[in-house]
Amino acid sequence: MIRLDGAGVTVSLPASGQARTRVLLHPTTLELAERRIAVIGANGSGKSTLLRLLNGLVLPSVGQVRVHGLDTARQGREVRKLVGFVFTDPLAQLVLATPADDVELSLRPLVRDRSERRAQALQLLAGRGLAHVADQSVYDLSGGERQLVALTSVLAARPRIVVADEPTTLLDLRNRDQVRDALAALEQQVVLATHDLDLAAEADRVLVVDGGRILADGKPAEAIGAYLRLVRG
Ligand SMILES: Nc1ncnc2c1ncn2[C@@H]1O[C@H](COP(=O)(O)OP(=O)(O)O)[C@@H](O)[C@H]1O
Ligand SMILES: [Mg+2]
């Protein structure tokens, strides 16, 4: 369960003379309990800001965000254990040279023994059909493989919630389907930003973000309809 209580995000823009501020997300109150939640909206509407609030990558300037009762501002470390974050560009999160090393790093807090950790990392990669690339440079993987490695790495830490920020935007159709299927199969609660309206339509609930506000929030058909009217008039 994720709760936003009047949570808003404002940044100050460096400007000569008086400081200027910009609202990225207006104070928002939401309870996110559904298993599959999609966030849609134009580029620059505030989707990433909203998603980043959910694991404390961005802290609210006003209000509060709580995940399973934990305050993202005061208990950021614990929150990040609960909430795994998948970025649009997997290279933003794959910090080590090979998939095996990266997944192993995610397992470090959970598995003490080094060789056991290695074995589990290889097993997790094999489970996603990635055994053959386990020791290859992450730079030599296809976009889809890279995103699946990133997802494997995030899941290795056993989060209870997965937040994914446009995880399929950079992928071709086949890779997109693979990542979609992998996300669909997760037991965890998933909150995902996407431009793929077919994917959004499969969610239990869809939030439409526009100009840093929640413009619509409801069943997919209803919310996607509101988004299409917004864009196309
Ligand atoms: N740290 C920041 N400082 C200033 N502006 C920002 C910052 N982060 C995001 N923005 C701006 O806020 C708006 C919303 O950004 P974002 O949440 O990334 O939107 P989306 O993910 O929907 O494209 C954009 O106009 C973006 O340029
Ligand atoms: Mg974004």
Image (cartoon, rainbow, N blue to C red):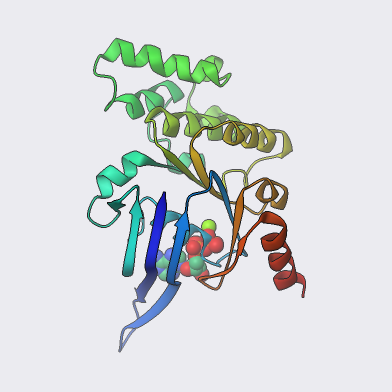
Residue 123 on image: x %, y %: 46, 14
Residue visible at 41% across and 18% down in the picture:
121
Residue 37 on image: x %, y %: 56, 50
Residue 66 on image: x %, y %: 34, 55
Which corner quadrant of the image does residue 210 belong to? bottom right
Which corner quadrant of the image does residue 5 belong to? bottom left
Residue visible at 44% across and 41% down in the picture:
161
Reply above or below: 154 against 113.
Answer: below
Q: Is residue 210 left or right of residue 152?
A: right
Q: Is residue 154 left or right of residue 199?
A: left
Residue nearest the observer in this picture, 214 or 129: 214
Residue nearest the observer in this picture, 126 or 163: 163
Residue nearest the observer in this picture, 15 or 168: 168
Reply above or below: 116 against 81.
Answer: above
Question: Can residue 145 be seen in the rendering of this structure?
Answer: yes
Which quarter of the rendered picture does the C terminus lie within? bottom right
Residue 65 on image: x %, y %: 35, 59
